[in-house]
Image: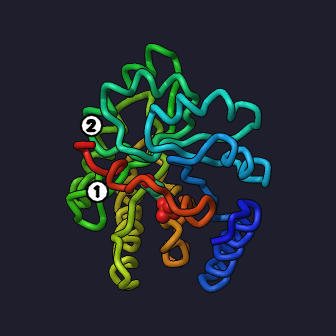
Amino acid sequence: MNNDIRTNIESILNRIACACDRAGRSQNEVQLLLATKTVSEARILMALNAGCTLIAENRVQELKEKHHALSAIAHTRHFIGHLQTNKVKELLKYDVACLQSLDRLELAQKLDERLATAGRTMDVLIQVNTSNEKSKFGVQPKRALELVNDVAQLKQLKIRGLMTIGVFSSDAHQVRQCFRLLKSLQETIRQAGIQGVVMKELSMGMSGDLEIAVEEGATIVRVGTAVFGKRTTEDSYYWNENK
Ligand SMILES: *Cc1c(COP(=O)(O)O)cnc(C)c1O
């Protein structure tokens, strides 16, 4: 792992470009999002200075801690972590453009309520648990359409697509199946023609599997480790309900 953030970003963009080539896609169709959990403000600023414009946190606490320092450089912020309903009010303080991890109606309703009070809307992606692992959040695939239907009734939420975390496996075929499932759900939901629902974004692929995701239609890949290096905090800290 190279320590130089700029070099790492270049190499990620190159990986994305190669995967796009293989898939016959344009590189412009895929956005790089930097997953910045555990990463210091100083290092995130280096990435923003290197030209990245899209970042995301997993915890409201980290959004809060880094918010001030990061406001020095214009960028777009998404949220990709499990969001407890009682953190919604706090989340809205930090100018998050898109909640990628919307996975239940109760959360959507609370968010909609708070946004209505604030007189604003928010883009959301529906997070789907395509790997069927208990440790991961996300609506079950067979319930995704139903959730989209329900969330579409909420006026302040703008559904822009789907998000998933692929299975952690060295078996590329299994990983690919997760991404294919997300893509097929996108098609199913599109065909349902639900008013106000835009099925444009597919947020899938991370440091280890972004090529497969791009080949399967990702429009946003979320990369942390390959840019910032290995994290000392276990991901289970972010991905388990009980932590
Ligand atoms: C941490 C995280 C990523 C990035 O993972 P890396 O393997 O470090 O690239 C992507 N998506 C989510 C939801 C994450 O929590």
Residue neighbourhood size for the residue with mark 1, other residues' Cα within 10 Å, grouped as few (<14), some (14–19), many (≥20): many
Residue type indicated by callout 2: Leu
Counting the numbered discs, the total is 2
Using the image, tell me which numbered label, if any, was put on residue 105. Answer: 2
Using the image, tell me which numbered label, if any, was put on residue 136. Answer: 1
In the displayed structure image, the side of residue 33 where residue 149 appears, left or right: left
Percent x, y for residue 185?
35, 63
What residue do we see at 64% from left, 48% from top? 54
Residue 115: quarter of image: top left
Percent x, y for residue 61?
46, 32
Residue type indicated by callout 1: Lys
Residue 202 in sight from this viewpoint: no
Residue neighbourhood size for the residue with mark 2, other residues' Cα within 10 Å, grouped as few (<14), some (14–19), many (≥20): some
What residue do we see at 23% from left, 65% from top? 132
Please name whichever residue, 86 or 1, is drawn nearer the observer in this view of the structure. Answer: 1
Quarter of the image where the N terminus is located: bottom right
Percent x, y for residue 98?
52, 40
Q: Secondary structure at mark 2?
A: helix
Q: Secondary structure at mark 1?
A: loop
What residue do we see at 37% from left, 27% from top? 87
Q: How is the image coloured?
A: rainbow
Q: CA distance from mark 1 to mark 2?
A: 17 Å
Foreground mark, 1 or 2? Answer: 1
Residue 22 in sight from this viewpoint: yes
Question: Ligand 1 within 8 A of label 1's CB?
Answer: no
Percent x, y for residue 135?
24, 57
Looking at the image, residue 219 lies above or below residue 42: below
Looking at the image, residue 146 lies above or below residue 176: above
Please name whichever residue, 11 or 213, is drawn nearer the observer in this view of the structure. Answer: 11
